[in-house]
């Protein structure tokens, strides 16, 4: 029997504004519904509970905006990138937007030891941004975080590779590079939560964090 | 107009459980209209996760937003963490669409789906910057409620400018048109209430005139909501809901919904198939759920299920059919329709003996359940769920022991099935609701309900069935809140002042606070829980429910006769 042709496609999207407060699982649900509404022909898993053949990128922590989210779907029709992008964008909630499609997409064998993640951290005050930069760039910075329901001690160590302060239009940006996913290296989510705690009363000056790039290392 | 959400910081939102509940922006959300003549907010007095599954909200949202002059938005009860944040920052509760404070709307339409939301209603108003008592309000939105728990409107009368009794589809447009006109004419609040009182089904506490339950006669020809808002947070019923008919012909004597939604009105099968297509296309939900009080009574069930089974928009699509009375023909039908979801087998015998099932007019026999269990041996149906009530009128201990005998018998049969069936039992105290033939019956007290529950639990200790039950005090409270008069409003207000919220959620229900509220208001629950004489005037008699009182009296007498005859047979 002839197998239908399969077109693996990577769809890159952003999560900003109120959509950054939608959890990863709810995001999957929202995207799955959007794909069904478009009545796309996609490959499904075999078995009694049929699921679309779709895989999502690593979960984005709640509250983080991102311009580098993605999912990979196996379509049964060759996609027209522009029209699919336009159609999908009509079906997404406010703050979620398809940026681009990559087709054909070939999965790379992952031998990744971790990820490098680039962020823009936005501050409304230069003083707070400076304080944050110093805190982030000190490998000795220690903090506590939760892991599997237990409090654990962490040190920044090599988690923060770079943090440059840039004056933007109406605020101050820390352009930061993190690594995560390595043993004993705290995740970005844990680091920024601890940073907000460290900033105390000034934490609201640190009002937005945007993930701008993610790369396996 | 200020968007309240702009005053909440990123870090504050991250301290809240599921912040997406409070931010709107979902797919199919209505777009803001420029200067609409009327701005209303549809308010659901429970969590977003529940309210977004509520059909009334979906119906009114689509109906009102398709009207060129009306903008309808939504608000839900905030979970206590978000309430604390709003109170700490002195921010009002707001609508999800535009972040508008509730006090800035022209009207609030509050759905009352169950009595345990009443303290949430008071809380919502207070959080929205609106005095909870209508007599103390001289500005701000008109507060109008409706829904099955308002069928006896007296307990919530002190909070509402007006209450709609019955179906809302037509009335809500009439209400809005009245509000548009009175707004244009600059009519004062009392004048507006006077105008609202002229609408069929509307009861205005200020005038307290007799009222007739509103029935939406055009239901069968009406279009259901087919473009629902798609929640950004998973809801309790994660499926597209299609109401196939309204009303029920079963006539169970304990069931308020069975009388509230009368008469039975069916949408034609061919139309439902088309609505289902639109609904799935617009929602992308994996599952389509058919909604009614008793799906088996739908006259074109085979045609409908067969057509829905064949209409497949996407590969993972399935149809779920709750409220299906299982029998051999239903099973055959389900077997022939591969895309209809096979859940567990659910039965609601409600009573443990045939005698009591006849008394309450529950049309199910032990043989029905057994034959289905046997017929489904070797199939995917592995779980059997059974619902029982305790404290029913004319109930004896033999009926309670009957629950034990019935379940033990079913356990034996379940053990012979391959794979074995897992049985779970849900027990609840009976609440005699207004406008049912049992409205005159006494509410069984806590110790009696507890004693009966223990008989069942002990009797089933070793059988392997899972038994769950509803806390007995909740049943009593529900009884007071549904059978009460205006004074019960004071009780609700006091309970809210003492901190009661989310009374339907076991993690938030505070029995001690409710007991304190009873004590401080001097309200004796017994007044509302006692048996009533058929000759006496009931607090809710001013509502013409379109079910004659004489019919309810006859049914009550018939139940007594059935109980008496059965007793005589067993003793004779």
Image (spheres, rainbow, N blue to C red):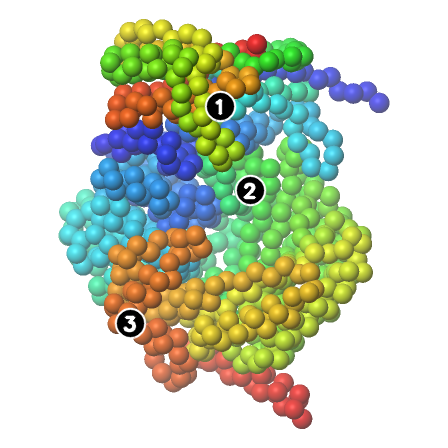
Q: Tag 2's secondary structure?
A: loop
Q: Is residue A84 visible?
A: no
Pair 1/2: label in front: 1
Q: Is residue A120 above or below residue B393?
A: above
Pair 3/2: label in front: 3
> Mark 3, residues whose alpha carbon is within 10 Å: few (<14), some, or many (≥20)?
some
Q: Is residue A63 left or right of residue B270?
A: left
Farthest residue, direction right = A1
* Badge count: 3
Of labels 3 and 2, earlier in sequence is 2
> Mark 1, residues whose alpha carbon is within 10 Å: few (<14), some, or many (≥20)?
many
Are labels 3 and 1 assigned to the same chain?
no
In this figure, which residue is indicated by the disc labeled 2?
A: B239
Give the residue at x 43% y 32%.
B26
| Labelled disc at residue B523 | 3
Cα distance, mark 3 to mark 1? Answer: 53 Å
Cα distance, mark 1 to mark 2? Answer: 26 Å
Farthest residue, direction bottom = B572
Q: Is residue A70 above or below residue B11?
A: above
Q: Tag 3's secondary structure?
A: loop
């Amino acid at each position: 029997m002839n197998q239908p042709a399969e077109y693996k496609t990577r769809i890159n999207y952003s999560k900003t504004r109120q959509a950054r407060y939608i959890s990863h699982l709810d995001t999957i649900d929202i995207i799955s519904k959007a794909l069904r509404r478009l009545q796309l022909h996609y490959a499904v898993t075999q078995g009694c509970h049929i699921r679309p053949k779709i895989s999502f990128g690593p979960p984005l922590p709640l509250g983080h905006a991102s311009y580098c989210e993605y999912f990979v779907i196996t379509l049964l029709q060759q996609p027209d990138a522009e029209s699919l992008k336009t159609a999908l964008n009509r079906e997404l909630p406010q703050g979620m937007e398809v940026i681009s499609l990559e087709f054909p997409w070939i999965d790379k064998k992952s031998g990744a030891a971790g990820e490098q993640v680039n962020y823009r951290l936005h501050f409304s005050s230069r003083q707070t941004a400076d304080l944050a930069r110093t805190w982030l760039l000190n490998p000795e910075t220690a903090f506590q975080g939760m892991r599997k329901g237990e409090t654990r001690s962490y040190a920044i160590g090599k988690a923060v590779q770079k943090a440059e302060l840039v004056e933007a239009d109406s605020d101050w940006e820390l352009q930061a590079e993190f690594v995560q996913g390595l043993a004993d290296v705290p995740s970005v989510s844990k680091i920024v939560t601890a940073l907000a705690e460290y900033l105390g009363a000034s934490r609201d000056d640190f009002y937005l964090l945007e993930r701008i790039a993610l790369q396996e290392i | 107009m200020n968007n309240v959400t702009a005053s909440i910081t990123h870090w504050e939102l991250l301290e809240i459980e599921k912040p997406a509940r409070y931010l709107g922006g979902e797919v199919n959300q209505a777009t803001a209209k420029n200067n609409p003549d009327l701005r209303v907010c549809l308010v659901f007095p429970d969590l977003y996760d529940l309210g977004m599954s509520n059909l009334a909200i979906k119906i009114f949202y689509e109906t009102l937003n398709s009207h060129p002059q009306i903008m309808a938005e939504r608000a839900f009860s905030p979970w206590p963490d978000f309430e604390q944040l709003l109170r700490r920052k002195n921010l009002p509760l707001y609508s999800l669409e535009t972040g508008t404070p509730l006090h800035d709307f022209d009207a609030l339409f509050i759905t009352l789906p169950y009595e345990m939301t009443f303290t949430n209603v008071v809380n919502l108003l207070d959080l929205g910057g609106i005095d909870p008592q209508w007599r103390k309000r001289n500005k701000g939105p008109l507060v109008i409620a409706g829904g099955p728990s308002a069928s006896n409107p007296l307990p919530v009368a002190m909070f509402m400018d007006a209450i709609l009794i019955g179906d809302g589809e037509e009335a809500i447009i009439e209400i809005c048109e009245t509000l548009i006109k009175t707004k244009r004419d600059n009519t004062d609040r009392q004048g507006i209430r006077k105008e609202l009182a002229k609408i069929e089904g509307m009861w205005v506490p200020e005038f307290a005139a007799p009222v007739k339950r509103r029935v939406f006669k055009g239901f069968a020809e009406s279009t259901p909501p087919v473009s629902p808002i798609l929640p950004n947070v998973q809801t309790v019923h994660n499926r597209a809901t299609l109401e196939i008919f309204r009303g029920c012909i079963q006539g169970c004597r304990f069931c308020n919904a069975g009388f509230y939604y009368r008469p039975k009105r069916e949408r034609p099968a061919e139309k439902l198939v088309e609505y289902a297509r639109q609904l799935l296309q617009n929602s992308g939900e994996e599952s389509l759920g058919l909604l009614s009080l008793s799906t088996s009574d739908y006259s074109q069930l085979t045609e409908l299920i067969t057509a829905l089974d064949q209409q497949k928009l996407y590969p993972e699509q399935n149809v779920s059919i709750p409220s299906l009375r299982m029998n051999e023909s239903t099973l055959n039908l389900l077997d022939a329709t591969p895309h209809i979801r096979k859940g567990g087998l659910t039965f609601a015998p409600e009573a443990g003996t045939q005698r009591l099932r006849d008394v309450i007019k529950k049309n199910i026999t032990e043989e029905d359940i057994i034959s289905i269990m046997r017929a489904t041996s070797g199939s995917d149906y592995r779980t059997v769920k059974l619902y029982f009530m305790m404290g029913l009128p004319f109930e004896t201990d033999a009926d309670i022991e009957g629950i034990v005998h019935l379940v033990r018998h079913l356990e034996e049969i379940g053990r012979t099935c391959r794979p074995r069936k897992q049985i779970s039992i849900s027990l609840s105290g009976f609440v005699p609701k207004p406008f049912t033939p049992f409205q005159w019956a006494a509410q069984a007290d806590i110790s009696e309900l507890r004693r009966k529950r223990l008989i069942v639990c002990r009797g089933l200790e070793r059988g392997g069935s899972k038994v769950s039950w509803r806390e007995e005090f909740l049943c009593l409270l529900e009884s007071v809140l549904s059978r009460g008069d205006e004074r019960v409003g004071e009780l609700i207000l006091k309970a809210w002042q003492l901190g009661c919220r989310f009374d339907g959620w076991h993690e938030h229900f505070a029995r001690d606070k409710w007991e304190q509220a009873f004590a401080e208001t001097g309200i004796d629950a017994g007044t509302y829980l006692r048996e009533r004489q058929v000759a006496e005037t009931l607090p809710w008699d001013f509502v013409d429910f379109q079910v004659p009182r004489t019919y309810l009296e006859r049914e009550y007498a018939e139940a007594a006769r059935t109980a008496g005859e059965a007793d005589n047979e067993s003793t004779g």
